Amino acid sequence: MQLSEAKEKYIQTWGTFATNWGINRTMAQVHALLLASGKALSTDEVMEQLEISRGNANMNLRALMDWGIVRKEFVKGERKEYFIAEKDVWYLFKQITKERRKREIEPVINFLEELKNIEDKDTEGAKEFIKLMEDFSSVTGKINNIMDLAIKSDDHWLVGKITNLLK
């Protein structure tokens, strides 16, 4: 397989995988393109290589910057904006974990807390419902704590902990 073929396959497959994780396919493809590129790319280059519209490219580049995994890079003598992906994989993992926690786990925690505040708490049905919500809250809270540890840890610490769990 030639390098260009491998990069194209990586970009397309990464976009497909991302949809399984609940992430926009094009956003993942833009990120994969920037990761695989040896240099910062302009919006025009992203559009051309992925065959997407300017609006789609701009929207996804902004989203990736909001996630903290892509940044603008100044190119001397150029008026266009150029973008480059953060290539430290551990940093990427932590940023993506932080963003997913904010978008997926924290809303669930808040939602479950709200559901436990019912007025007729003394009925048998209400007690069962509250217990169920507390059980969900417990599991979600543990997932949140694990994500928090991953975000705050360095790679050696987390890999060591995971390795110990697998023994």
Image: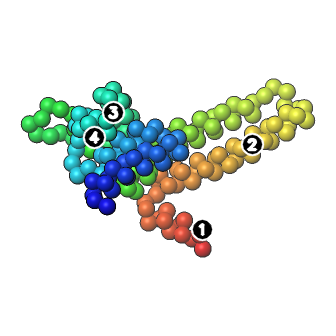
Which badge, 2 or 1, comes first in the chain's sequence? 2
User: Which label is found at residue 101?
Assistant: none
Q: Residue 165 carries which label?
A: 1
- Which of pointers 3 and 1 indicates the residue nearer the eye? 3
Name the foreground residue: 12 vs 72. Answer: 12
**In 3D space, how far apart are the residues under numbered discs 4 and 1 (Cα atoms)?**
42 Å
Write the residue at 22% across / 44% down: 40
Give the Cα separation between the discs numbered 2 and 1: 26 Å
What amino acid is at disc 1?
Leu
Name the residue beneath numbered marker 4: 49
Q: Is 120 on the left-hand or right-hand side of 100?
A: right
Instruction: Give the amino acid type for the residue marked by disc 2 in the picture.
Output: Glu
- Location of mark 2 (residue): 134
Residues at badges 4 and 2 in contact (C-beta under 8 Å)? no
Q: Is mark 1 on a helix, strand or loop?
A: helix
Q: Quadrant of residue 89?
A: bottom left
User: Of discs 4 and 1, which sits in the foreground?
Assistant: 4
- In the rendered view, does 124 fall on the left or right side of 48? right
Which of the two residues, 139 or 49, is positioned nearer the viewer here?
A: 49
Q: Quadrant of the C terminus?
A: bottom right
Residues at marks 4 and 3, CA–CA distance in whole angstroms:
8 Å
Q: How crowded is mark 1: few (under 14 residues within 10 Å), some or many (20 or more)?
A: few
The residue mark sitting in front, 2 or 1, is 1
**Would residue 67 be seen by someone viewing this image from the given angle?**
no
Q: Which amino acid does label 4 sit on?
A: Gln
Q: Which colour scheme is used?
A: rainbow
